[in-house]
Amino acid sequence: MEVKDALAALAGLAQETRLAVFRLLVERGPEGMPAGAIAEALGLANATLSFHLKELTHADLLSVRQAGRFIYYRANYRTMNALVAYLTENCCRGNTCDIACAPGPEPRRKAS
Amino acid sequence: MEVKDALAALAGLAQETRLAVFRLLVERGPEGMPAGAIAEALGLANATLSFHLKELTHADLLSVRQAGRFIYYRANYRTMNALVAYLTENCCRGNTCDIACAPGPEPRRKAS
DNA sequence: TCCATGGTTCTATAATAGTAGAAACGAAGC
DNA sequence: GCTTCGTTTCTACTATTATAGAACCATGGA
């Protein structure tokens, strides 16, 4: 992940409405949700939601799938994990990770 | 970490200049850097840098220490790790993490 | 106390982002 | 073909953010 990709992802999530949309879709899981249902769930005007969906999609945080007249959005976990990895990599970049990062909580490991 | 804290941290990092400042300080490590040195390293006007340092500090991404006339800023790893944990927690929140998160890379574990 | 230096706040300006009504678009069914 | 429904684009307006010159505040040294 490049600086500009990280910036896009961060900017994507750094907004109340978009974070809410993203979290909703994360909860919903891989099947995703059509735009109208998202708008209703969060009480957003269609145009407003559409604006944010575009932002999130451009940041590659969402992926899109058309099913009939419905357009389903779902969270792109890959990008979010890449962002987390990018930040973590930045944090520790090779040297004295124990000293520098010790105060923080340990990152979670995927349940296996 | 609450939604508003995550939002503050994300907004803090979601800006080119601030991300550059933060990464510079992350590299520099626990001793930090005085404001003037940061401004010089990144070619920023003092007032501009000061604005961003305040933003980052308010988001608790930086901590401050005064030494004589110099004011040292250093990255607050704790907050960054909390943000990562928040996003990860969001990602997996309890259910079907293997399916949902599998495509992404595995989060790094602290070197022990 | 006076000066030089390191930083911040004040102020104004320019640029960007968020919101949402209204119009337009495209797919599905008649 | 026409109509309906889900969604996006157009448009305009408002609010927020980024930038930096200039004035200001603190600290340390002569």
Image (spheres, coloured by chain):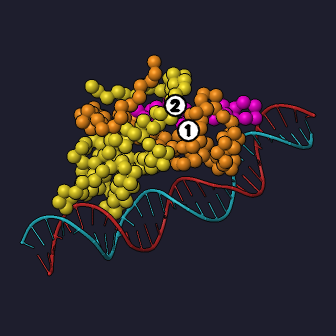
Chain colours: A yellow, B orange, C cyan, D red
- In this rendered view, identify the residue nearer to me: D17 or A106: A106
> In the image, what residue type sits under mark 2?
Arg
Residue B86: horizontal and vertical position, in percent? 40, 35
Percent across and percent down for residue A93 are 52, 31
Asked if marks 2 and 1 touch (Cβ < 8 Å), the reply is no
Between A3 and B85, which is closer to the camera in this rendering? A3
Task: Please state if B37 lies on the left or on the right of D28 as rendered.
Answer: left
Q: Position of residue C18 (x, y in %)?
A: 43, 57
Q: Callout 2: few (<14), some (14-19), or many (20+) C-alpha neighbours within 10 Å?
A: few
Q: Is residue B38 above or below residue B107?
A: below
Instruction: Using the image, name the chain to which the residue with label 1 belongs.
Output: B
Quickly name the residue at label 2. Answer: A93
| Residue located at (45% from left, 18% from top) | B112
| Residue B106 falls in image quadrant | top left
Asked whether the viewer can see residue A67, the reply is yes
Up the image or down, C8 lies above or below D28; here it is below
Residue at the image position 76 percent from the left and 35 percent from the top: B69
Residue type indicated by callout 1: Arg
Return the residue nearer the eye: B112 or C10: B112
Residue under label 1, please give it.
B23
A14 sits to left or right of B39 = left
Q: Secondary structure at mark 2?
A: loop
Q: Which residues are magenta?
A: B60-85
Q: In this orientation, does residue B63 appear?
A: no
Q: Split into 4 quadrants, where in the image is the N terminus of chain A?
A: top left
